[in-house]
Image (spheres, helix red, strand yellow):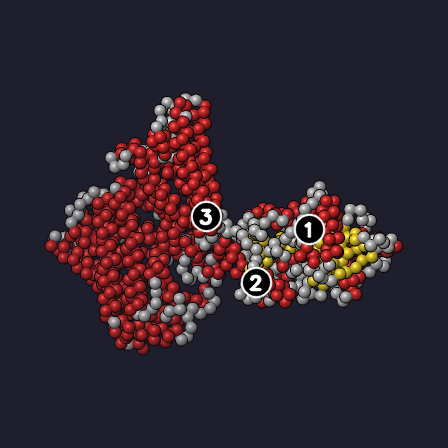
Amino acid sequence: MKYWRWLFWLLIVVFVWLVVSRFTELEKLLKVLEEGRWQWVAAAGFLQILYYTAYSAIYQFAFDTVEVKSRLRDLIPVTFASVFMYVAAPLGGTSGSMLFVDDARRRGESPGRAAAGTLLVLVADYGAFFLILILGLIYLFLAHDLKTYEIAGAIALLLIIGGIVAILALGLRRPDLLCRLLEKIGDILNSVALKVLKREAVSPEWAQKTTAEFTNASLAISSQPGRLFKTLLVALVAHGINLVSLWMVFLAFQQTASIGVLVAGYSMLILFWIVSITPQGVGIVEGVIPLVFTSLGVPANQAVVITLAFRGLTFWIPFLIGFVLLRRMRMFKPQTRPATDIWSLRIIALLTAVMGVVNVLSAVTPALQERMHSLRTLLPLTVTHGGRFTAALAGFALILLAGQLGRRKRTAWYLSVFILVLSAISHLVKGLDYEEALLAITLAAWLIFLRPHFHALSDPISIRQGLRALAAATLFTLAYGTAGFYLLDRQFRLNFSLYTALRQTILMFTQFYDPGLEPITGLGRYFGDSIYLIGLATFSYATAMLIRPVLVRQPATEEERQNAKAIVEKYGCSPLAAIALLPDKAYFFSTGGSLINYSLQSRVALCLGDPIGPPEDFEQAVSSFNKALCAQNDWLPAFVDVAPDYLQQYNQLGFQYLAIGQEAILDLATFTLEGSANKSVRSTYNKFLKLGYTAQVVEPPIPDDLNSALAEISNAWLTLVHGSEKKFWVGWFDETYIRSSRILFVSDRADNRMAFANILPEYQKNAVTIDLMRHRPEAEPGVMDFLFVSLFQWARDRGYETVDLGLSALSGMGQSPADPKVERALHYLYEHVHQFFNFKGLHHFKEKFHPHWETRYLIYPGLANLPMITLAMIRADSGYSLLRR
């Protein structure tokens, strides 16, 4: 895995080096292309992409001939990537072919048959070209312009074709000789691999296995001449497309050429491309082909320009696309690509925002006069003005959508591709700004190639709501503007009829920099500005609705709750297990039988504790929750109040962790009221006994009269603390919840209920915990100490081992200089912020019972997401949720 990751980054370095080293050449190419007619240059570039698509079809037909399954859409990225590899790592021209063989192997196909298929592609490609070459040589001969080096090149090509055919025939006629040859190659590969990789590259039986597969492929080729003919025909079509692309370049530079000149020039260009020793004939083709065109009557300057332009398009287009698609190769396994995936998304989001800024700046910048002069002969002025407004509006939209692309939003992807294409058109119609148009199209193409990475859904109801709002607001804005201009025409220098008022409203959104509007009063200026404000607000609201994360609008079903209850009872072993069954939670069930409970806050899926289920299913449960649910719905997963047991596994799954406090756990076997350390608690407990206070535990179902008394205590306590019910971490006073709980209550001498707590089981752990703890305002001070000691005694008498006293937030963390900075910042809050949160007071209350402390953690996907997750924790604690009950 590490080897492939290093190889990928090495290829990135090679790409950067090639671009930097050839930057002057690239600048020269762009200047050359600027001299041509952009329509024909664009057509030639498009035909290059079509040519390599057809070339991928050659591989598909060749693989079909040797019985290797393949799909065209899977082969197109490999074809472009192979072009990049031919340049970045020539290896005698074999590096590109190796990609096809490796891709076939990783798809479960025979690498030997795939290798035979790649040779068949070369035979078909070179064979089809040889037919065109014969026509070119005949034309040159008739024109008395056939040179010796051209004949030598043709002979060299014929020998190459014969050599490849001989290799294929070797597998059919002399497999023993082929096997010996492969054994020698295997020995060489292994000797190199042992020195570099410290392991063998191929197994001892590789030669025999490959020979057998190669022989079978050769038999398949010889037994199906019809498929071989189809492969040759597709190769001929591909060369035809490439030939037409050359013709487009001639037209771009206003140079006429007969079919004979085109065929002769193309045949020589491709011939020296093939037989030259440099990758893709770099340096040789550029020197020879201008001489060929010049000898055929093309002016010398034009011959050089056409050669440079065509060579530039045929080199840089597949090279750049190949580099982008290299990361989709199967050799870079999915588990090795998360970092590069993340950076690709960040880069594409950043470039989209930059493109948005370019759009806005371009919209407010005057066009070049010579381009505007050419444009006015093609398009009316109103279309040009409309293009300027469209570019600005598209720019603002791209800036808004950039962040959503970083979140993998599918809707944002659709909108961005559409807007980028629209931007390209608007840049052309507003001033022939083909530089910006080319950038927009390139960015759109990159987005299209990255399509599989944009899978996060938007909320369907919000999308419909946004579209309805956009349509309604458009009609309202038109009606508002029309009525306003018609009724307020005295505020302007025009007398508006209904038609002219409607037309003026439309012009406001198509010619924003000069809509022909001349208000003469403050009210007129205000009204004109208000139309823009309404349009901006409407557009922003609709965009926000279209990209809104999926919401959980319904509570868990009864079936889901019963399933969750069964899992909690079977695997629950923490104080949070029972809280997971409260109705503010939604549920995710893994295929391995685990349960993850969560509450959705904005776009944060806040999970309480670790997954509950079989320990061996932990990683699969977290991974599927993250990828199958959260990533799909544009949610950020976060696990709160988790134990330290699975920190390493969380880290391996791409999460980070942060200490958020300590859990107080009382060991009942060692708990005692004796000794000086417990003097305060002992005195309080004895005082309440003397006052006649008693504690009693009632098993569910709780009777109505007790339930009413507890409700009265709860309401009085909430009034005392000036608070409201909290949720997520704890339960809240709900009659159904309390009635089904075990209750410990404290009564005074007159049998008045003064305080209570509900006791929760920890299921598979021999322990209990408490949830709600409330008392009357007039209760004797220290009543909760009496309640807790009574709880400990009851639990010990019932055979429980521990009592969980809950989380002491922010305690025991960030005290060492070596601790993370975030934890030290939280420790400062713990020590100094007491006005709103009494963290230290709660810790000291629990500390008096001498529990032992266990650290609890927040699991989160990245430091940048901490502010949003913190806000989600506050919202969840306050009881506000996007879960609609």
The kind of residue on which mark 1 rests is Ala
List x then y, in percent, for residue 786: 81, 55
Taking the view exactly as shown, the residue that stands out farthest to the bottom is: 176
* Mark drawn on residue 559: 2
Quadrant of the rendered image containing residue 326: bottom left
The kind of residue on which mark 2 rests is Glu
Q: From the viewer's perspective, is residue 41 above or below residue 271?
A: above
Task: Compute the Cα span from label 3 to label 1.
Answer: 39 Å
| Residue picked out by circle 1 | 809
Q: Is residue 510 visible?
A: yes
Label 1 sits on a secondary structure element that is strand
Q: Is residue 122 left or right of residue 833?
A: left
- Mark whose residue sits in front, 3 or 1: 3
* Mark drawn on residue 568: none
Taking the view exactly as shown, the residue that stands out farthest to the front is: 704
Q: Is residue 104 left or right of residue 613?
A: left
Task: Compute the Cα span from label 3 to label 2.
Answer: 29 Å
- Mark whose residue sits in front, 3 or 2: 2
List x then y, in percent, for residue 759: 72, 59
The kind of residue on which mark 3 rests is Ile
Q: Residue at x 42, y 56 (%)?
A: 452
Q: Earlier in the sequence, mark 1 or mark 2?
A: 2
Q: Is residue 750 left or right of residue 398?
A: right
Q: Earlier in the sequence, mark 3 or mark 1?
A: 3
Task: Compute the Cα span from label 1 to label 2.
Answer: 34 Å
Q: From the viewer's perspective, is residue 199 above or below residue 641?
A: below
Label 2 sits on a secondary structure element that is helix
| Residue picked out by circle 3 | 463
Q: Earlier in the sequence, mark 3 or mark 2?
A: 3
Q: From the viewer's perspective, is residue 40 above or below residue 341?
A: above
